[in-house]
Amino acid sequence: MCFKTVTETVIEKVKDVFGHAPVSESGIERPSPKGRVSQVFTTKKNGEWWVEYGPFTTKPRLTGVADTNSMDTFIDRGYTASIDRGEIPADIVVGDVIIYDVGYGEVIHQVVEIDSDEKGRFFRCKGINNKGVDPWIIRDGNIRGVWTGTIPTKKGVNTL
Protein backbone atom coordinates (compact mmCIF):
# COMPACT_ATOMS: atom_id res chain seq x y z
CA MET A 1 0.00 0.00 0.00
CA CYS A 2 1.35 3.46 -0.88
CA PHE A 3 0.67 6.40 1.39
CA LYS A 4 1.12 10.01 0.27
CA THR A 5 1.97 12.92 2.49
CA VAL A 6 -0.32 15.95 2.55
CA THR A 7 2.42 17.91 0.77
CA GLU A 8 2.66 15.32 -2.04
CA THR A 9 -1.13 15.40 -2.47
CA VAL A 10 -1.20 19.23 -2.64
CA ILE A 11 1.62 19.27 -5.19
CA GLU A 12 -0.28 16.77 -7.36
CA LYS A 13 -3.46 18.88 -7.20
CA VAL A 14 -1.55 22.05 -8.14
CA LYS A 15 0.04 20.21 -11.08
CA ASP A 16 -3.44 19.08 -12.20
CA VAL A 17 -4.77 22.66 -12.14
CA PHE A 18 -1.75 24.68 -13.31
CA GLY A 19 0.29 22.11 -15.21
CA HIS A 20 3.37 22.53 -12.98
CA ALA A 21 4.48 22.15 -9.39
CA PRO A 22 4.00 25.17 -7.11
CA VAL A 23 6.92 27.60 -6.97
CA SER A 24 7.44 30.89 -5.23
CA GLU A 25 7.10 34.07 -7.26
CA SER A 26 10.86 34.42 -7.46
CA GLY A 27 11.40 30.72 -8.10
CA ILE A 28 14.58 31.00 -6.03
CA GLU A 29 15.43 28.66 -3.15
CA ARG A 30 16.59 30.87 -0.30
CA PRO A 31 18.68 29.86 2.72
CA SER A 32 16.63 29.05 5.81
CA PRO A 33 17.72 29.27 9.44
CA LYS A 34 19.64 26.27 10.70
CA GLY A 35 17.57 24.07 13.00
CA ARG A 36 18.91 24.56 16.52
CA VAL A 37 16.16 22.94 18.60
CA SER A 38 16.67 19.21 19.09
CA GLN A 39 13.73 18.40 21.37
CA VAL A 40 10.08 19.42 21.15
CA PHE A 41 7.39 17.96 23.39
CA THR A 42 4.00 18.74 24.85
CA THR A 43 3.00 18.68 28.49
CA LYS A 44 -0.25 19.28 30.27
CA LYS A 45 -0.16 21.84 33.09
CA ASN A 46 -3.23 22.83 35.07
CA GLY A 47 -5.54 21.45 32.38
CA GLU A 48 -3.83 23.30 29.48
CA TRP A 49 -1.47 21.92 26.86
CA TRP A 50 1.96 23.54 26.52
CA VAL A 51 4.65 23.10 23.89
CA GLU A 52 8.19 23.03 25.25
CA TYR A 53 11.42 22.87 23.28
CA GLY A 54 15.17 23.04 23.74
CA PRO A 55 17.85 22.51 24.84
CA PHE A 56 19.45 25.94 25.06
CA THR A 57 22.89 26.93 26.31
CA THR A 58 21.24 29.43 28.69
CA LYS A 59 17.68 30.32 29.63
CA PRO A 60 16.18 31.56 26.34
CA ARG A 61 15.05 35.14 26.23
CA LEU A 62 11.61 35.95 24.93
CA THR A 63 11.35 39.37 23.37
CA GLY A 64 8.74 41.47 21.64
CA VAL A 65 9.35 42.76 18.13
CA ALA A 66 9.22 46.33 16.82
CA ASP A 67 6.85 47.11 13.96
CA THR A 68 9.45 47.83 11.26
CA ASN A 69 8.04 45.33 8.73
CA SER A 70 11.59 44.28 7.85
CA MET A 71 10.96 40.63 8.80
CA ASP A 72 7.23 40.27 7.96
CA THR A 73 5.80 37.58 7.87
CA PHE A 74 8.59 35.68 9.52
CA ILE A 75 8.48 37.86 12.64
CA ASP A 76 5.87 40.59 13.07
CA ARG A 77 4.61 43.15 15.58
CA GLY A 78 3.03 41.47 18.57
CA TYR A 79 4.94 38.24 17.98
CA THR A 80 7.34 36.88 20.54
CA ALA A 81 10.79 35.83 19.34
CA SER A 82 12.63 33.10 21.22
CA ILE A 83 16.35 33.83 21.35
CA ASP A 84 19.20 31.68 22.63
CA ARG A 85 21.49 34.20 24.31
CA GLY A 86 24.10 31.66 25.30
CA GLU A 87 27.50 31.18 23.73
CA ILE A 88 27.58 32.49 20.16
CA PRO A 89 27.77 29.38 17.98
CA ALA A 90 30.70 28.91 15.62
CA ASP A 91 28.31 27.26 13.15
CA ILE A 92 26.17 30.29 12.26
CA VAL A 93 25.28 29.88 8.59
CA VAL A 94 23.83 32.07 5.85
CA GLY A 95 20.08 31.95 6.45
CA ASP A 96 20.29 32.02 10.26
CA VAL A 97 18.54 34.86 12.03
CA ILE A 98 20.68 36.63 14.60
CA ILE A 99 20.14 39.41 17.10
CA TYR A 100 22.89 42.00 17.09
CA ASP A 101 23.67 45.32 18.74
CA VAL A 102 24.15 48.35 16.49
CA GLY A 103 25.09 50.75 19.28
CA TYR A 104 21.65 52.22 19.90
CA GLY A 105 19.51 49.09 19.98
CA GLU A 106 19.24 45.51 18.84
CA VAL A 107 18.24 44.27 15.39
CA ILE A 108 16.82 40.86 14.44
CA HIS A 109 17.76 40.14 10.81
CA GLN A 110 18.83 37.24 8.61
CA VAL A 111 22.49 36.49 7.82
CA VAL A 112 23.09 36.92 4.07
CA GLU A 113 26.90 36.82 4.00
CA ILE A 114 29.72 35.49 6.17
CA ASP A 115 33.29 36.54 5.51
CA SER A 116 36.49 37.41 7.32
CA ASP A 117 39.18 40.04 7.23
CA GLU A 118 42.21 40.96 9.34
CA LYS A 119 39.88 41.53 12.35
CA GLY A 120 38.26 38.07 12.03
CA ARG A 121 34.84 36.72 11.10
CA PHE A 122 32.04 39.11 10.22
CA PHE A 123 28.45 38.94 9.03
CA ARG A 124 26.25 41.00 6.75
CA CYS A 125 22.53 40.85 7.44
CA LYS A 126 19.28 41.94 5.88
CA GLY A 127 15.65 42.18 6.86
CA ILE A 128 13.91 39.70 4.55
CA ASN A 129 11.60 42.46 3.26
CA ASN A 130 14.30 45.11 2.91
CA LYS A 131 15.68 45.75 -0.56
CA GLY A 132 19.25 46.23 0.56
CA VAL A 133 21.71 44.71 2.98
CA ASP A 134 22.08 46.38 6.39
CA PRO A 135 24.88 48.99 6.48
CA TRP A 136 26.64 47.39 9.47
CA ILE A 137 29.43 44.85 9.57
CA ILE A 138 28.53 42.56 12.47
CA ARG A 139 31.31 40.92 14.46
CA ASP A 140 30.94 38.12 17.00
CA GLY A 141 31.12 40.75 19.76
CA ASN A 142 28.00 42.47 18.37
CA ILE A 143 25.89 39.29 18.36
CA ARG A 144 23.50 39.02 21.29
CA GLY A 145 21.82 35.77 20.34
CA VAL A 146 20.48 33.40 17.72
CA TRP A 147 16.80 33.17 16.84
CA THR A 148 15.23 29.80 17.74
CA GLY A 149 11.55 30.39 17.06
CA THR A 150 8.64 32.75 16.67
CA ILE A 151 5.43 32.58 18.65
CA PRO A 152 2.49 34.54 17.20
CA THR A 153 1.30 35.76 20.59
CA LYS A 154 -1.80 37.84 21.24
CA LYS A 155 -0.33 40.44 23.57
CA GLY A 156 3.44 40.45 23.12
CA VAL A 157 5.79 38.85 25.60
CA ASN A 158 4.84 36.61 28.50
CA THR A 159 7.99 35.27 30.12
CA LEU A 160 7.35 32.49 32.58
Image (cartoon, rainbow, N blue to C red):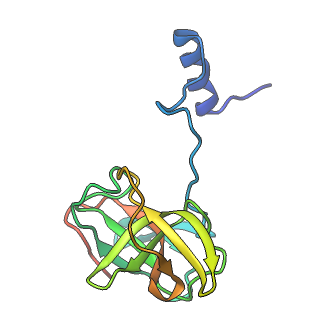
Q: Quadrant of residue 104?
A: bottom left
- Across and down, in percent, residue 155 comes to 19, 65
Judge whether 96 appears above or below 141 on screen: above
Extreme residue toward the right, this view: 1
Residue 48 can be seen, yes or no: yes
Q: Nearer the viewer, residue 93 or 34?
A: 93
For the N terminus, give its image quadrant. Answer: top right
Residue 59 shows in this picture: no
Q: Is residue 156 left or right of residue 33?
A: left
Judging depth in this view, the residue of 149 and 31 nearest the camera is: 31
Counting the numbered discs, the total is: 0
Residue in view at x 42 percent, y 59 percent:
133
- Above or below, comparing residue 42 to residue 116 in the picture: above
> Foreground: 126 or 58?
126
Residue 49 is situated, as x and y percent measured from the top left of the image, at: 40, 64
- Give the residue at x 47% y 82%: 143
Q: Quadrant of the C terminus?
A: bottom left
**Does residue 73 appear left or right of residue 31 in this picture?**
left
Q: Residue furthest front?
A: 118
Residue 24 location (% of width, % of height): 50, 32
Q: Give the image location of residue 33, x and y in percent.
A: 55, 60
Q: Is residue 5 positioned above or below 77 on the image? A: above
Determine the residue positioned at 58% across, 11% down: 19
